[in-house]
């Protein structure tokens, strides 16, 4: 299906979720996650009117950027190895996966202008997940105040892989609570007004719970296995 059509469906779902939550659609941004599709399909996403693109590997990011002729806002959404920071950090506008001090140190060293970052939080506490535990988020953000090139614009999480909607909803609620808590501190280096949460299967729940950035791949651009015509 053309991205244009999928985008219309998703925009409809977003506006319904916003209506249920009494929110403005202007406060919800769609990041098209293009990690599993071709450069051509990524270009189609931009022609369809999408402006935010998400990639999760340095190679994918650089290949897309080399092949695309339309301006875009690039989001790095994957976990980032310290040794790959220099390949990535000056080629994106937003990093969604700041999850440890060693990564912050390397970014501070390599980045040539201030970079907007989300702190990735492992709300559910699953062993296999990346992210700072909820109980450590506040002290982590506090200790970033001397990293002058890093601006913490919000918190990011990935919901657990479950069909239990209530479990997913509670994860998003917890992230929202923590985001408001940090925002209330008034840190200059961490305004923390944004929430990056919600993917193809759970973006409506995420929006009901306050997401300002949803990261949508499969439902919007499909993946490589799909017919790309
Ligand atoms: C792949 C990915 C997404 C998009 O997932 P879909 O289920 O395809 O929408 C969102 N966020 C992150 C961090 C991802 O790696």
Image: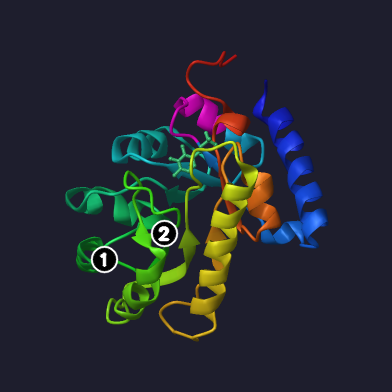
Q: Residue at x 64, y 44 (%)?
A: 165
Residue at the disc numbered 1:
104
Q: Mark 1 or mark 2, which is nearer to you?
A: 2
Q: Residue at x 54, y 35 (%)?
A: 217
| Range of magenta residues | 34-44
Q: Which quarter shows the C terminus? A: top right
Give the SS element for disc 1.
Answer: helix
| 36 lies above or below 181 | above
- Report, in whole angstroms, how far the alpha carbon at label 1 lies from the one at label 2: 15 Å
In the drawing, what numbered circle is on residue 121? Answer: 2
Report which quarter residue 96 is drawn in.
bottom left
Q: Residue at x 46, y 25 (%)?
A: 38
Report which quarter residue 5 is drawn in.
top right
Residue 115 lies, in percent from the top left, at: 38, 65
Q: Is residue 171 magenta?
A: no
Q: Residues within 10 Å of mark 2 (few under 14, many from 20)?
A: many
């Amino acid at each position: 299906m053309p991205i244009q059509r999928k985008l219309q469906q998703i925009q409809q779902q977003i506006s319904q979720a916003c209506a249920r939550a009494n929110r403005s659609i202007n406060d919800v941004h769609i990041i098209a996650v293009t990690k599993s599709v071709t450069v051509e399909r990524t270009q189609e996403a931009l022609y369809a009117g999408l402006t935010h693109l998400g990639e999760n590997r340095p190679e994918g990011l650089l290949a897309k950027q080399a092949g695309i002729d339309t301006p875009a806002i690039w989001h790095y959404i994957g976990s980032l190895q310290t040794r790959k920071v220099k390949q990535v950090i000056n080629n994106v506008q937003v990093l969604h996966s700041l999850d440890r001090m060693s990564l912050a140190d390397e970014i501070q060293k390599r980045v040539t202008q201030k970079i907007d970052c989300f702190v990735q939080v492992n709300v559910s506490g699953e062993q296999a997940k990346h992210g700072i535990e909820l109980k450590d988020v506040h002290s982590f953000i506090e200790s970033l105040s001397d990293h002058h090139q890093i601006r913490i614009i919000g918190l990011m999480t990935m919901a657990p892989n479950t069909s239990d909607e209530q479990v997913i909803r509670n994860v998003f609620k917890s992230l929202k609570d923590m985001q408001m808590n940090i925002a209330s501190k008034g840190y200059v280096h961490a305004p923390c007004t944004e929430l990056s949460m919600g993917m193809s299967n759970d973006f409506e729940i995420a929006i009901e719970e306050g997401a300002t950035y949803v990261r949508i791949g499969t439902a919007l651009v499909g993946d490589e296995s799909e017919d790309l015509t």
